[in-house]
Amino acid sequence: MNKQEKERYLREYGILKAQGKPFFPYAVAKDGAMAILVMVVILAMAIILGAELGPKADPTSTTYTPRPEWYFFFLFELLKVIKPPELVPFATIGVPTVAMILLFLLPFYDRNPERRPERRPIATTAGILTIAAMGYLTYLGAAAGPPTEIDIPVPANVKAQGPAAVADFEAGAQVVAQSGCAACHKFGENGNDGPGPELTEIGQRLPAPAIERTLLNPTAPMPSYAGVQQDSPEQFAQMVTFLSELKAEE
Amino acid sequence: MPKLKVPSPPAPLQPKPKRPGKKTGPEGPVEHGHEATASTIGWIDERTSLSGAGRWMMFRKVPKGTNWFYTLGSATMFAFLSQAVTGVVLAMYYEPEPTRAYESIRRINNEVFLGELVHAMHKWGSTVMVILIFLHMGRTFFFGAYKYPRELNWVIGVVLLILTMTMSFTGYLLPFDQRSYWASIVGVNINGTGPLVGPYLSDFLRAGPYFGATTLSRFYAIHMMAVPGAIAALIGFHLYLVAKLGTTAPPWIRAEAPEATREEKVAA
Amino acid sequence: MPERKQPKSKYTTDRQIPGAFEGETVTRRRFMSGTGLAVGGIASAAFALPALGFALGPVFEEFDQPWQPVGKITEFGSDTYVARTITLVPEIGDAGKSTVFMRRFNPAVDTEDRDEYNEYIAVSSACMHLGCPVNYVSSSQRFICPCHGGVYDFVGKVAGGPPVRPLDRFYTRVRAGIVEIGPRFSVNSELQRFSPRDPGEPLDGVGQYLYPSTPDLRKLDTN
């Protein structure tokens, strides 16, 4: 903004201000109404949602799934999305620091005198994209299930085979979850996307005998589940059944 | 429109009819009250000259077109005031000690009168404050309100945003349940991934190599004293600049030249 | 515009100040403003520096890591891990405890040199991405972190996800048939021992210099 533009803005603003109304009582009345609304929302949330306390902090726990407060979900998801270990400092420190510096210096690199959002296409697009990206990461973070559980609804064709098949399917899901498969494979909303392929529809691609062969003689880095077959053949069979029933819904 | 009549005050409060020959002056409790208020304000103003600043702050004009979007800033400040008050009363019962923190919060929830309500207000108030501060920043961004001459106020606003996030991070540990413990561990380790200074920073936050006896009181002191003081001071400066520079008009409002100049143009 | 004042000469003699002498530049006003700033600075430093030192103190204080018994030698096999609870920080109850996974040294999988401190392997349960609690899943022989998708293989090396180095370990020794756990140490991807680092701090390549170990926690001096 050069000197002339500055003067033009100040002149125009002076006229607008002179045509305006006094802060008290006109703006104060609006602010007050908003303050009441804020308090009503806080009180309503406090009364309806309460302040439930989880179990006491236990550093020895190895089964707890930590999750942050919702407004840090985007950061949490960012840490999940950036996989290569060499890039971890970029996700934890780099991206947030750069974002903060960009935010700090905004008035110093955006020197366009125009203020109307529709005439600042770059700034407006960048703003909307940032909000959309944060919203999307927040959604992903909120939807992410722990890799120690698998919630996949029982498919219709398994239901049709009667309650015994449903029980088998659910038992298989539990065995798969406890065997740590979701650490490397994605199952619907649960599990990690990689290093292994997504298994949400594995039954579509591999028949049961092929799944069994893969579990017994996998390619590295996947471990062999031959131990499970030796110790508890029933659980191993449930695992294979569950995986072979994972098909796309028609 | 017919106006409602203001009901007259009850008989003992009504001014007594003046007796002939008596001096004029305040009569009755209402007039006395008015007089007392006015003289108290006068007494203070004579010694502080604050009434000018008050008038400057309150009776400044806000430009044409000011709408509900402009209440987001004051709403954020109001949420902060609510957090400050509920926080102070929570501090009366809370014990920042690893073996007692969880129990003291449970006592607040279950035994203290209105304890769970105040705790819940503080907890959800933080959510509301974070939402409001982001909405306020979004409004400022899309209205171009960070531009000349308000650049410095934007920078202060970003500092306030960071301090608010610091508050939610440090406050998160205090209930000392599983969720807060592990979130704090991850948060401290995130600080530790900064090259060179990171390891020292995370040791500073934890007061040692592990989560220890004084980690909780360290977070508590930052949450209770250091950051709120900074936030209050910066809000004051933020508001001073708002009053001095004036709030912006919505960007699509154009100034019409005042009547007088328009007539001159026609004449010319 | 008013005429700008002629800048005054910096020499007191030029300004005809009584008692001035040749070459003198410090006026009474200059002296007093300097004094004011210096006095204010000294007074602020007098409370700010001790407060800063007080807050930073624990970073430079050496942390005590005593040996503690975790069980008899017969309790630990060489082909699976057994979880044990140890105390990292005394006197704060459960908040100072942690879980370690223990097994006997297994020449079939362990490639590092054998010495008196690794007859039994004790693996920390803190994920080396950002410190979440990992769990050992015996059917897949993997350590799995529930936060951001870290996976470690049987010896604790990274098998997938974002962790930057293998799981930390503890020195162990055997005293009268009892396995004891001592100080913690970090390892790089070749399982070389380093002074303990926090999670998220890589040790390969320049990592060990970018993330120095802090004076409060050092590895055992084994030489």
Image: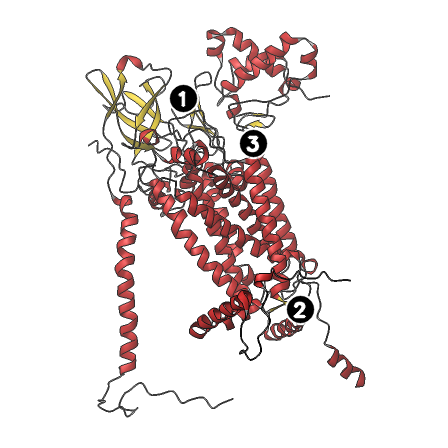
Answer whether residue C16 is visible to the viewer in this image: yes
Q: A178 or B7, which lies in front?
A: B7
Residue named by callout 3: A144
Give the x, y percent position of residue C149.
49, 30
Q: C114 or C14, which lies in front?
A: C14
Q: Quadrant of residue A199?
A: top right
Label 1, label 3: how far apart the Cα atoms are: 26 Å
Q: Earlier in the sequence, mark 3 or mark 2?
A: 2
Q: Identity of the amino acid at label 3? A: Ala
On the rendered structure, is A12 left or right of A178? right
Density class for disc 2 (Cα within 10 Å; few <14, some 14-19, many ≥20) is some
Q: Quadrant of residue C36?
A: bottom left
In this view, A238 is above or below B57: above
Residue named by callout 2: A20
Q: Chain of mark 3?
A: A
Residue named by callout 1: C154
Q: Quadrant of residue A22?
A: bottom right
